[in-house]
Amino acid sequence: MDTSGTQQGANMVMDNTLMHVLHGCKLADELRLCLPNMAREPHLLLQACKEIVNTFNKAIHGVISQPVFNVTVTGNMDKLHQDHQDPYTSLGISWPSSGHPSTQLLEADTMIGSSSGVDQRLGEKSSKRPKNKRKDGEGMHTVRVPAPLSGNTEIPPDDGFTWRKYGQKDILGSRFPRSYYRCTHKIFYGCNAKKKVQRLNEDPLTYEVSYSGNHSCMTTITPVTIPGVPGELDTGVSSSISTPTPLRRWFMGNIEGTQRGNTEEHARGDADYQPSDLADELFNSLGSRSTMEGIFPTKQDK
DNA sequence: TTTATTTGACCTGT
DNA sequence: ACAGGTCAAATAAA
């Protein structure tokens, strides 16, 4: 079995996760600097907080989709429940005791099968439509999220990703219709991430959201060349230990530098870049094209 | 003009 | 046969 491809995929997912963490740090940093003015602008404060939560939420999704993490979670939720842990707390993430951020998970109900990937339903057999394997829960995890505390409670809370609704269905025994969403970037990147959103009969203010597929639009990113890090990409050398990509190397360099108190001399490169610099590189160097299409070249562009 | 949503029809698994 | 999932044309919104 060749696991190098899986390993590389995991590396890329982790790179994106780190990217989101860094971006979140940057946003939090900016918010901290602007905090004195925010008292007069509660709506801006709310907006900023939401953006930060969304960014870290993406990072959480990335971490959870890691194979090493799924080994713990997959098919073993009972164990997690016995330990009174969920994927979030096991990562050391705690939520404020009062109220939920809009994207907070109330409960991780299921995490069945492998989320390594790609929606297997799109088989190779080409028929008019892809075959629907309706194996309940396979490669899918379900969470319950509260409706937004303010604003329109008819729509599910933002989870940090952009979704496009492609269907709605009345479900037997449910008072509320089920909505079907797929990743907005499906067309450009073949991203197979999907979600189903259903309001609970017993609690209309709670949504049950079932995710399936992974955001390949996040994982197919070409490693970003960090300034100061000569454009060395992975050479494809396969080893049991993941080969650090430039982004991870940068990140590790920063962590190590921080741990050492940054007293060491660094060659021009990794440690000279703060998280905010990196996030700027990633998100702001794209000129007017600040969308995903700006970050990832599209097939159309090619 | 482009992009997103709605919704009836169609397809597939049970 | 039925229910759930998806497609795609029509429509709405930006």
Image: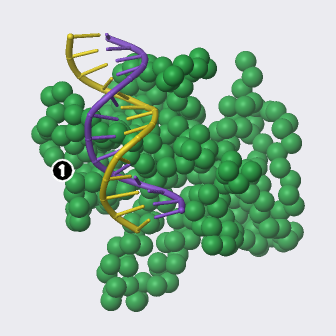
Chain colours: A green, B purple, C yellow
Seen in the image, is A131 located left or right of residue A300? left
**Foreground residue, A281 or A104?**
A281
Inspect the image, locate mark 1, and give the three-letter code of the amino acid beneath it. Leu
Q: Is residue A17 in view?
A: yes
| Residue C9 position by quadrant | top left
What is the x, y in percent for residue A189?
A: 61, 44
| Nearer-the-camera pick, A126 or A105 | A126
Query: For the point 38% across and 25% down, which residue is it?
Result: A137
Residue A138 vs residue A11: left or right? left
User: Vertical placement of A127 versus A199: above or below?
Assistant: above
Image height of A149 relative to A167, above or below = below
Which image quadrant: the N terminus of chain A?
top right
Q: Residues within 10 Å of mark 1 (few under 14, many from 20)?
A: some
**Residue A85 appears at what percent x and percent y?**
37, 39
Q: Is residue A100 left or right of residue A90?
A: left
Is disc 1 placed on a helix, strand or loop?
A: loop
Subunit under mark 1: A
Q: Is residue A76 visible?
A: no
Q: Position of residue A266 (x, y in %)?
A: 83, 69
Q: Is A140 or A80 nearer to us in this picture?
A: A140
- Report which residue position mark 1 lands on: A205
Left or right: A193, with A126 as reference point: left
Query: Percent position (x, y) of residue A199?
Result: 22, 42
